[in-house]
Image: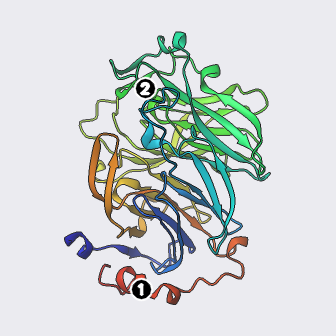
Amino acid sequence: MSILWERHGVTLYKPEKVCEGYTVIDPFTSRDVWIIDIRGNYVHRWVMPTIPRHHGMFLENGHLLYATMAPLPDESDMSFPRVATFAMCGGLLEFDWDGNLVWKYVDKYQTHTFCRMKNGNTMIPRLVRVPDEMARRVKGGIPGTEDRGMIWTDDLHEVTPDGKVVWEWSAVDHFDPDVHVLCPLERRGDWTHLNTCEVIPDGNVLVGFRNIDTFCIIDKATGKIKWQWIGNGISHQHCPTMLDNGNILVFDNGAHRKDGSLLNYSRAVELNPATKKIVWEYKADPPQSFYSALISGCQRLPNGNTLICEGLKGRVFEVTTDREIVWEYVSPFYAPLHTIGRSYGYSNALFRAYRFMPDIPGFKGKELDPRKLDWVNRLYGPEGYGS
């Protein structure tokens, strides 16, 4: 297949400007999770029991927390959402460095993202049905596209290591259909579509909701929304992250933009929550040359650079504060990618990618040796014919 001969792996590397470390990637269409070094050598591999329900999350203790793809209930099960099955997960698996299963949690309503908290608990988003009376008030969406007459939204469960739910939150109790309006080009069965949750340093929860162009901070003690951003130039975002300076970094996917733009484009945006002003952004020139309508994310690195995952293109790149690209990787792992009623053909998509510093506890005493994965490095590493 000709795509195997296109340029992949690390395609750009400016050693004097990059943030040295290891990057974790998990191809959307594969059971493999990889760690690569800064030069593009593959230095560690996990092989999972299923392809991901979007992604795995590398933990700083060296474990991998992985969203498994659980079997979907029978079509006749009216208690289960059908409109959002592409985002359903159904359970989490945690593996140690050597691939041994050390923890498992099953919930058929769990969706595709999650957060391991500092106290050892796990924050898990789930789908929940919107009550009929409230569902009739939900504005927006393509008329007649409810999920067999139903509309679904999101809630959150904080789960202990022994599987007990110790905290709950539901969008039904805190969102207003007159304010949190569904994008007119999305299906009405999936109102909010939570795609990111992060417990921030003050203990509150930063959450992103794609279909209503909203990300917000939930007061964990009361459940009330203490801060939120709705639209205001950002469209169908992913991966809002609280930075050390108190600002929020977010991947603005840019699908279905409402600002009159002729062409869609993506960007990474840093905003000040107090002023609700954008203080930094990265977008391409021309803007439409950098675009991923779905998935994707961004991460602020210790040296001030930003790592950006352009998910649907399988591309990960690092930019400086001056917006110079100093490192780039393109995934060589292609396979058919399907969503509900839609095919993307052969895809090398990545849900997210994260860079980890060499001194984290999870790497201590570990062998990060490309010779262990000689076969894949000969094919796709810096000297491979797929590079």
Circle 1 packing at 10 Å, graded few (<14), some (14-19), many (20+), is few
Image position, residue 179 (x, y; %):
51, 18
The residue wearing badge 1 is 375
Q: Report whether 72 appears left or right of 96.
A: left
Disc 2 is placed on an element classified as loop
Considering depth in this image, is 38 or 271 the residue closer to the camera?
38
Near-viewer residue (349 or 106): 106
Q: Residue at x 44, y 51 (%)?
A: 296
Q: Position of residue 291 (x, y in %)?
A: 33, 49
Amino acid under label 1?
Trp
Q: Is residue 19 visible?
A: no
Crowding at label 2, few (<14), some or many (≥20) Cα neighbours within 10 Å? many
Q: Tell me the colour scheme of the image.
A: rainbow
Q: Quadrant of residue 188?
A: top left
Q: What amino acid is at disc 2?
A: Gly
Contact (Cβ within 8 Å) of mark 2 with mark 1: no
Which residue corresponds to mark 2?
Answer: 189
- Report the residue at 40% width, 43% height from top: 253
Q: Residue at x 49, y 51 (%)?
A: 53
Q: Determine the secondary structure under disc 1.
A: helix
Depicted 367 relative to depicted 257: above or below: below
Residue 376 pos. (x, y %): 41, 81
Q: Is residue 213 visible?
A: yes
Image position, residue 80 (x, y; %): 51, 31
Q: For residue 65, what is the image quadrant?
A: bottom right
Label drawn at residue 123: none
- Sequence-wise, which precedes: disc 2 or disc 1? 2
Quadrant, the N terminus: bottom left
Q: Residue furthest left?
A: 2
Q: CA distance from mark 2 to mark 1?
A: 45 Å
Task: Locate residue 13: give its quadrant.
Answer: bottom left
The C terminus: image quadrant = bottom left
